[in-house]
Image (tube, rainbow, N blue to C red):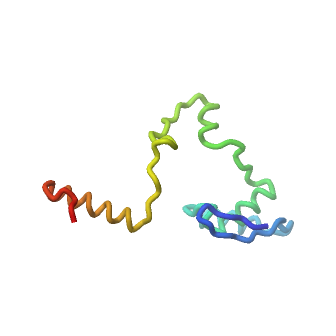
Amino acid sequence: MLYYTRTGETIVIPSEICPRADLGLAHHQMQRHLSCRIDHCAWKWVAYTTLIHHGHVVPAEFGPLDRAEQRGLHLPATSLSPATMPEPQPFWQLGDNLDRLTGQLRDPNAGGAE
């Protein structure tokens, strides 16, 4: 089975978990890779799926917003709607814009002209 991450990377994952999988090792890997994101770390992904397969972890059925709503909690809405969201910029362009902004902060009379 192939798993595609948000970053475009492809991870090959076996479609079945071996019944002889070492649960102690899976628990250890989950602790060792605690700060890793599951979609960026193959070790954590395999450990997580092993623990799910053996019933040691039950994945959440709902996302954080749904769970908050079920508990009557109000989470603040994001200020950016799809209509007002800025267009993505290449990294170099973002750096140029930050350089221009810092130049304007240092010298307000510069006006950003190059």
Which image quarter: residue 111? bottom left
Residue at (84% x, 65% y) in the render: 16
Q: Which quadrant would residue 99 be assigned to in this image?
A: bottom left
Q: Residue at x 80, y 69 (%)?
A: 14
Please tell me which residue lies in front, 71 or 109.
109
Q: Residue furthest front?
A: 113
- Relative image position of residue 25 (x, y in whole percent): 71, 69
Q: Nearer the viewer, residue 72 or 26?
A: 72
> Could you say which quadrant of the image residue 7 lies in?
bottom right
At 79% from the left and 54% from the top, the residue drawn is: 55
Left or right of residue 77: residue 55: right
Quadrant location, the N terminus: bottom right
Tally of numbered discs: 0
Residue at x 74%, y 71% (from the top left corner):
12
- Of residue 114 and residue 84, the one placed in the foreground of this image is 114
Quarter placement of the C terminus: bottom left
Relative to 21, 99 lies left or right = left
Vertical placement of 19 versus 83: above or below?
A: below
Foreground pick, 81 / 47: 81
Residue 33 in percent (x, y) is at: 59, 65
Q: Position of residue 84 (x, y in %)?
A: 45, 42
Q: Is residue 37 left or right of residue 103?
A: right
Residue farthest toward the top in the current orientation of the protein: 72
